[in-house]
Image: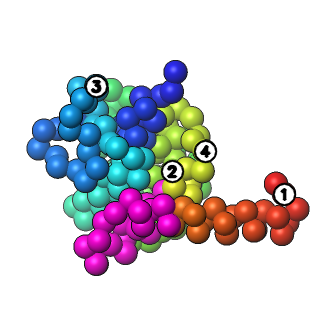
Amino acid sequence: MKPRGIRNNNPLNIRFSEYNEWLGRVSKDKSDNSFEEFIHLYYGIRAGIILLRRYIERGINTPKLIIEHWAPSNENNTELYIENVCEWTNFPADKKLNWEKPTDMIPLISAMMRMECGVRGPYWTMRVAAAFLTYHTTVRTSMMHASRYEYFMDTLSATTATSMRSVGRR
């Protein structure tokens, strides 16, 4: 069986709240009463980007502080979570993060998704990059569509395939 975060298109396991009106949220026929469900992985990653942006803007801006809020010790092994995310990102636990920097956010979100779901999903870093770039550019243009995400995914996939062939990997 797939992990809950993957089944729900919510790889950061964002808790359900009737007050959140996420774009792409499943509202009818919702099967999980504890966690949000999204119609597409893009929307689940996008919601996580928005939450992490809010954390950082409020001064919760290091991997340690973020994870202590995201995965509190009454529900998680928070220290292990911090250790793993820092190892997978090569970030010190006290690194000050900037939500606008892809080099900060993409590795952090990818590592948190891996921790939340217990697996590395296929092309997760590329999917996070596409969602981040789509969200980041659309914050300024107010055009938030999964179709842009798909465009970025297609572009990243083509670029990665070309890069892999050029170094002799398949």
**Distance of label 1 from label 3 (alpha carbons):** 41 Å
Mark 4 and mark 1 lie on one chain; the one further toward the N terminus is 4
At 24% from the left and 29% from the top, the residue drawn is: 29
In magenta, the rendered stretch is 128-151
The kind of residue tagged 2 is: Ser
Residue 89 image point, x, y percent: 56, 54
Residue 101 image point, x, y percent: 44, 71
Between circles 1 and 3, the one closer to the viewer is: 3
Of 109 and 166, which appears nearest the observer?
Answer: 166
Disc 2 + disc 4, Cβ < 8 Å:
no
Provide the secondary structure element on which disc 4 rests. loop
Q: Which residue is mark 2?
A: 110
Residue 42 image point, x, y percent: 41, 53
The kind of residue tagged 3 is: Ser
Q: Which residue is mark 1?
A: 169
* Other-residue count near label 1 (Cα within 10 Å), few / some / many at <14 / 14–19 / ≥20: few
Residue 105 visible here:
no
Between circles 2 and 4, the one closer to the viewer is: 4
**Distance of label 2 from label 3 (alpha carbons):** 25 Å
Q: Is residue 110 left or right of residue 47?
A: right
**Distance of label 4 from label 1 (alpha carbons):** 17 Å
Q: Residue furthest top?
A: 1
Provide the secondary structure element on which disc 1 rests. loop
**Distance of label 1 from label 2 (alpha carbons):** 23 Å
Mark 4 and mark 3 lie on one chain; the one further toward the N terminus is 3
Q: Which residue is mark 4?
A: 122
| Residue 100 sits above or below residue 129 on the image | below
Provide the secondary structure element on which disc 3 rests. loop
Mark 2 and mark 4 lie on one chain; the one further toward the N terminus is 2
